Amino acid sequence: MSDLKKVGIFVAAVIFIYFVFYLAQNFWIPEGKIKDPNTAQQVLEEGNGRYAAGKALHPNQDRDRRHETTSKGQEPFVTVLACSDSRVPVEVLFDRGIGDIFVVRVAGNVVNTDEAGSIEYGVDHLETPLMVVLGHSHCGAVTAVAGGAELHGNIPPLVRNIEKAVGVVKAARPDLSMGALVEEAITANVWQSIDDLLRQSEATRKRIRWNKLKVVGALYDIETGKVSWLGPHPRQFELIRKYDAEPKGEHKTGSSHS
């Protein structure tokens, strides 16, 4: 065999190994359900990176995946609370597919009884190791509340939680312009939703204490397609202790915000 042919075979082998490594890092989920929250977040980060760069792989979206999740059931590796905004397609922006993400969507990504119960199904029944509260830029619900828009029907009670977040930002930064106020309030609303979840969901608090669940905030930029990660609530364990100590009946009324 000539030296040139040997070099060609070597180069081809290196390219093949690199391709396999790339797939392993950016496409495949390890065999079995992901149980580590950091691994789950890494999979989301890598998927979002592909999506934002226009290099999405669209995994787990074919007929075989439909059949697999039908016969074996669902084993999502993350629960995501997101806004109902049509510009925030959760599986798309994380470049995942069928059975990967347990998604709960509601205007303003708020947490009331229905949302808390749905989240508990994901984190407690399906045992996802990671739970993400995903806010997003240009959120119409937060903008409406921050601007004092006149709201009708069932919307006022829906956004009442957002009013708390906006109030916190206004009290701390009365100098902010409308645009800056909305931006700050979107982040504050993510923290408010985590606070409300911890208040209402004993199951979530228990799983965090038992190191079986990680709850983090994140923000999606609808223009760039990128997700930035905020981490756990800065007062997470303080809130858990507080709500654990309160009579259970009080968890359904009122809410605290950092």
Image (cartoon, rainbow, N blue to C red):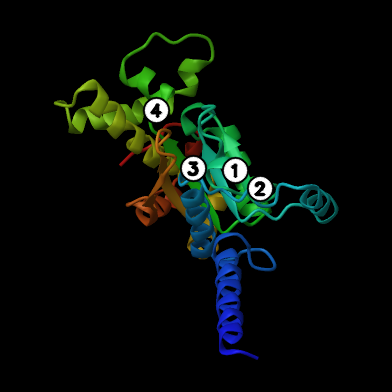
Q: Residue at x 32, y 14 (%)?
A: 148
Q: Amino acid at mark 1?
A: Glu
Residue 98 in the image, given as x and y percentages of width and height:
70, 47
Residues at circles 1 and 4 in contact by the CB criterion of under 8 Å: no
Q: Amino acid at mark 2?
A: Gly
The picture quadrant where one finds residue 77 is bottom right
Q: Residue at x 33, y 37 (%)?
A: 188
Mark 4 → mark 3, Cα distance in angstroms: 14 Å
Task: Name the foreground residue: 11 vs 192.
Answer: 11
Residue 20 in the image, given as x and y percentages of width and height:
61, 70
- Determine crowd level at label 3: few under 14, some 14-19, many 20+ residues with C-alpha closer than 10 A: many
Mark 2 → mark 4, Cα distance in angstroms: 30 Å
Which mark, residue 91?
Answer: 1
Of marks 1 and 4, the one in the foreground: 1
What residue did someone put label 3 on?
Answer: 197
Task: Name the foreground residue: 20 vs 142.
Answer: 20
Residue 22 in the image, given as x and y percentages of width and height:
55, 66
Indicate the quadrant containing the C terminus: top left, top right, bottom left or bottom right.
top left
Q: Residue at x 59, y 38 (%)?
A: 104
Which mark, residue 115?
Answer: none
Would residue 84 be found to the left or right of residue 241 on screen? right
Residues at circles 2 and 4 in contact by the CB criterion of under 8 Å: no
Of marks 2 and 4, the one in the foreground: 2
What residue did someone put label 2 on?
Answer: 97
Residue 66 in the image, given as x and y percentages of width and height:
79, 47
Question: Which one is earlier in the sequence, the residue at label 3 or at label 2?
Answer: 2
The picture quadrant where one finds residue 115 is top right
What residue did someone put label 4 on?
Answer: 162
Mark 1 → mark 4, Cα distance in angstroms: 25 Å
From the viewer's perspective, is residue 195 above or below residue 34?
A: above
